[in-house]
Amino acid sequence: VKDGNGVKGLADLGLLEVPERYIQPSYERINKQDSRECDMGPIDLSKLNGPEHKKVVDEIVKAAETLGFFQVVNHGVPLELLDSLKHAAHSFFNLPSEEKAVYLKGVSPSPKISYGTSFAPEKEKALEWKDYITMIYSSDEEALQYWPNQCKKVALEYVKLSSKMVKDIVEILIKKLEVESDESIIERLVGMKTVNMNYYPQCPNPDLTIGVGRHTDIGTITVLLQDDIGGLYAKAEDNDVAKEEWFEIPPIPGALVINIGDTLQILSNGKYKSPEHRVKTTSTQSRVSIPVFTLPIPTDKIGPLPEVVKKDGLAHYREVLMLDYMNNFFANVHGEKKTLDFAR
Ligand code: AKG
């Protein structure tokens, strides 16, 4: 990515095969036949305000306790904005390389915005077939000043318009833990937001490569907009079964994908699952996805909630500083659910 064109630059060369350093060991490769489509329909969040409130709450809680992934509709983010976001992501990654290069780490106009490729390219044995831009939200002014022109307005709208839904979902999940439902817990859990734009160029060897390797998200919850190409897989957790079971999270027009992050798994003492997930590449089209990660602020501490530990009789995690948890995540390559080991 040093020349500013990342994997997109490689894809544009029209290679018939990916370079050796993108070829994954077999354990990491994704075979569509080994997975099932997740057939859980989207949850209609507008029903939270009507007679079906309890049913919707139960659906959200059940999903958080099992796969850790679900999809939502009537989420408060206008459908036109979802289309504009996908369009904006393509516009950014289609820029000439020198225009993207200004956002590379080290030269970027702000440490809160960075453009890159793969996840930890200096450390990875095999690289991920993905370019991205990360934008950490701190204020509207900063976003409008520093984020790329191609996406700043829509990305900012997305962060803001998704935040009520994020708060509602977090509140439902915290209330269900029967802790003293104190508004400040919810506020702390949604203290920080980062929006990413991921770009997976079309790839000549989708069976040998990965878009994103096995990992969990470290925050509270993630909201993800994916386009209609598909390729996101989540692993069902079942400690008794040796065979891995993967579910494809299918694109649903107008829906947003929600997944639980490590922070909620830790806070709930393991009741809510932060699912391992990964992304397959595709040979036919370039895919975009746009996640908003919601996290506690770096100076906050996260640990199992005392009321939950009391009920469970033991704590499965220790208390850690969010900053240390984040640094550990970014200092390592992607790998299964190993970020959680940092809090054990
Ligand atoms: C991530 O950005 O951490 C993802 O897992 C992306 C998921 C996707 O592209 O569908």
Image (tube, rainbow, N blue to C red):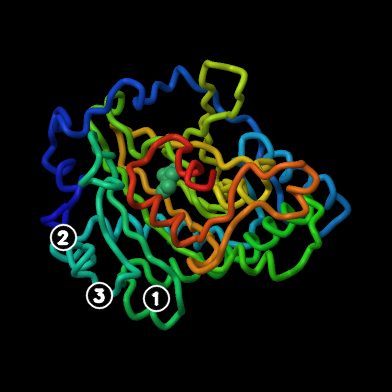
Q: From the image, tell me which residue sits under label 3.
A: 109
Secondary structure beneath disc 1?
A: helix
For the residues labelled 2 and 1, say whether their Cβ atoms are less than 8 Å apart. no
Image quadrant containing the C terminus:
top right
Judge by depth and name the residue closer to the eye, 160 or 242: 242
Identify the mark at residue 96; answer none if there is no mark: 2
Secondary structure beneath disc 3?
A: loop
Q: Earlier in the sequence, mark 2 or mark 1?
A: 2
How much space separates mark 3 and mark 2, taking CA atoms? Answer: 18 Å
Residue 319: x percent and y percent? 58, 55
For the residues labelled 3 and 2, say whether their Cβ atoms are less than 8 Å apart. no
Given the image, on which type of amino acid does mark 2 rest?
Pro
Looking at this rendering, what residue extends furthest in the bottom direction?
A: 141
Label 3 Cα neighbours within 10 Å, binned few <14 / some 14-19 / many ≥20: some
How much space separates mark 2 and mark 1, taking CA atoms? Answer: 22 Å
Left or right of residue 241, residue 299 in this image: left
Given the image, on which type of amino acid does mark 3 rest?
Pro
Q: Residue at x 34, y 25 (%)?
A: 29
Label 2 Cα neighbours within 10 Å, binned few <14 / some 14-19 / many ≥20: few
Left or right of residue 228, residue 309 in this image: right
Identify the mark at residue 143; answer none if there is no mark: 1
Residue 92 in the image: above or below residue 201: below
Given the image, on which type of amino acid does mark 1 rest?
Ala
Q: Earlier in the sequence, mark 3 or mark 2?
A: 2
User: Mark 3 against mark 1, which lies toward the viewer?
Assistant: 3
